[in-house]
Image: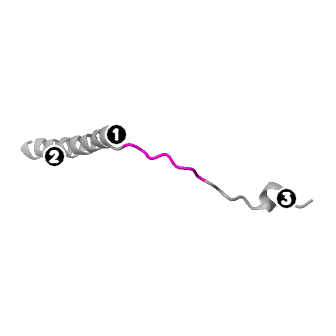
Amino acid sequence: MPTLLRFLFLCAVIAGSIYGAMVVLVTFVEPREREVTIRIPSERVNPPQ
């Protein structure tokens, strides 16, 4: 039984670390706005008849 508790505790610590890292990223990282240009070939816009 102690090994099961140790395993569950380890899984909880790993999950908590991942959750904490996501919270830190959401809180402190701001996305940069930039203009995006995507070139579409004319064959896709006007397919041949």
For label 1, the crowd category at 10 Å Cα-Cα, with few meaning under 14, some 14 to 19 and many 20 or more, is few
Q: Amino acid at mark 2?
A: Leu
Compared across the picture, whether 26 is left or right of 16 comes to: right
Kindly indicate the quadrant of the structure image that contains residue 29. top left
C-beta proximity under 8 Å, tags 3 and 2: no
Spot occupied by residue 33 in the image (x, y as percentages of width and height): 49, 45
Marking on residue 26: 1
Q: Is residue 5 left or right of residue 33?
A: left
Alpha carbon of mark 3 to alpha carbon of mark 1: how far? 43 Å
Q: Where, quadrant-wise, is the N terminus in this rendering?
A: top left
Under tag 2, what secondary structure?
helix
- Pointer 2 residue: 10
Between 5 and 32, the residue placed more toward the observer is: 32
Q: Residue at x 17, y 42 (%)?
A: 8
Position in image of residue 25 (x %, y %): 31, 43
Query: Looking at numbered disc 1 in the image, what kind of residue is underneath it?
Result: Val
Q: Does the magenta-highlighted stretch encompass residue 16?
A: no
Q: Nearer the viewer, mark 3 or mark 2?
A: 3
Q: Which residues are magenta?
A: 30-36
The circle on residue 47 is 3
Q: Position of residue 37 (x, y in %)?
A: 63, 55
For the view shown, which residue lies furthest in the right direction? 49
In the image shown, does 42 or 2 lie closer to the viewer? 42
What's the distance in space between the residues labelled 3 and 2, CA to CA? 57 Å
Q: In the figure, is residue 43 to the left or right of 35? A: right
What amino acid does circle 3 point to? Pro
